[in-house]
Amino acid sequence: MTDDMSGFGRSRALDPEDFYYNEDGYIVFTEAYHKKRGYCCKSGCKHCPYGFDKKTGMIRK
């Protein structure tokens, strides 16, 4: 089957304001990136603009 509509395997280039590298060399996504994505992944991201609290599993406003 050639029509994969899942979105997996597709990559788009990241803008410089979308991420930075921390002192350990890992990519850290910024609030700008999360807002562009448009939803909360509920992973407890450092710059989550949606207010997700990983300890409680709740999104606070």
Image (cartoon, helix red, strand yellow):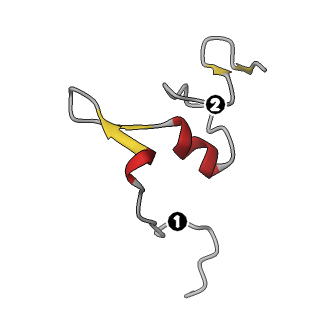
Q: Residues within 10 Å of mark 2 (few under 14, many from 20)?
A: some
Amino acid type for the residue under numbered disc 1: Phe
Q: Residue furthest top?
A: 55
Q: How many marks?
A: 2
Question: Residue 44: x percent and y percent?
Answer: 55, 25
Q: Residues within 10 Å of mark 1 (few under 14, many from 20)?
A: few
Amino acid type for the residue under numbered disc 2: Pro
Q: Earlier in the sequence, mark 2 or mark 1?
A: 1
Residue 2 is left or right of residue 5, and the answer is: left
SS class, disc 2 = loop
Q: Quadrant of the N terminus?
A: bottom right
Q: Quadrant of the C terminus?
A: top right
State the residue at coordinates (61%, 11%).
Answer: 55
**Quarter-of-image position of residue 34:** top right
Which residue is denoted by mark 2 in the rendering? 49
SS class, disc 1 = loop
- Residue 8 bears which disc, if any? 1
